[in-house]
Image (cartoon, rainbow, N blue to C red):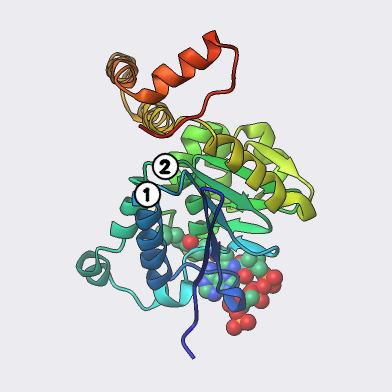
Amino acid sequence: MEEQYLIVEKQDRIGKIRLNRPRVLNALNSALIGELADVMEEMDRDDQIRVILLMGSEKAFAAGADIQELAESSPVDFVMKQFFADWERIRKIQKPIIAAVSGYALGGGCELAMCADLIVASETARFGQPEINLGVIPGAGGTQRLTRAVGKARAMEMILTGKPITAREALEAGLVNRVVPADQLEEEALALAKEIAGKPPIAVRLAKQSVLKAMDLPLEHGLHFEQNSFYLLFSSQDQQEGMQAFIEKRKPNFQGK
Ligand code: HXC
């Protein structure tokens, strides 16, 4: 029987995706990443979905790219298969992505968690970039996103030694949003997802894009993007609803229009 790499469920405006390759601790082979990009893009287009929640198992969010597959690859294979194209598709998802991380988030697993906009970690989570021990370096953004998230000193140490950090260390370093007991991970991540799902979707989308611009644009251009997004929101019904509800002292009901 063919392995089902992803378990997908849509519930209360949340699109839940669970990585499901338990035999290899959710090692990310190309087929899995391709399916993940397909599902995320489909959720990005689905008006019923406002937030994407990405999870692994209790033991592993993902223990990295599939080393078996990597070991058999040549530079030409990477070029011809466009090895990172599906990662780029994930990077371009516009709805907020929350990663709920328990256990190992190593190599590509840590990089995938960092593609999310928010990370909720269980106390058991371990984040690391062990590629150096395999004779390579991170390839799906690890050297870039980790450095932006935790700063040069810590990123350099993690990437040069390959040693993972604990959930608490990740929290202290600013890599994750919160650390929760393992048995409350899904519940806490869902609560955060629901909170954001209740916000005006167009503003959420533009807010996500604006914050991401802060990571790669000079201030002047980032401010310009923010201002234009701000102006644009004044053509949305949700802006009128949000401000009217405040004035009328009632709860707003955002429609995503
Ligand atoms: C393929 C993997 C795997 C991986 C684990 N497995 N990680 N298979 N790719 N990344 C497999 C093991 O071979 C083993 O299969 C089964 O999963 C269980 O793993 P064990 O090692 O027996 O478990 P444990 O002793 O608990 O150790 C857990 C672990 C270890 C510390 C996470 O598995 C480990 O070090 N894994 C590799 C981590 C890593 O180096 N990741 C970076 C990959 S490179 P069998 O058949 O023996 O039961 C990378 C580059 C990204 O991510 C580039 C861009 C995409």
First reached walking from the N terminus: tag 1 or tag 2: 1
Up the image or down, 255 lies above or below 13; here it is above
Q: Position of residue 146 (x, y in %)?
A: 50, 41
Residue density around tag 1, few if under 14, some if 14–19, many if 20 or more, within 10 Å: many
In the image, 139 versus 38, the foreground residue is 38
Instruction: Residue at 37% x, 26% y: name it.
Output: 210
Instruction: Residue at 39% x, 67% y: name it.
Output: 35
In the image, 256 versus 227, the foreground residue is 256
Q: Position of residue 115 (x, y in %)?
A: 45, 46
The residue indicated by pointer 1 is: 44
Up the image or down, 116 lies above or below 229; here it is below
Residue density around tag 2, few if under 14, some if 14–19, many if 20 or more, within 10 Å: many
Q: Can residue 133 be seen at all in this image of the molecule? A: no
Residue at the limit of the structure toward the bottom, as seen here: 1
Q: Position of residue 47 (x, y in %)?
A: 39, 47
| Measured Cα–Cα span from mark 1 to mark 2 | 6 Å
For the residue labelled by badge 1, is the local secondary structure a helix, a strand or a loop?
Answer: helix
Q: Position of residue 79 (x, y in %)?
A: 22, 64
Q: Give the quarter of the figure containing the C terminus.
A: top left
The residue indicated by pointer 2 is: 95
Amino acid identity at mark 1 = Asp
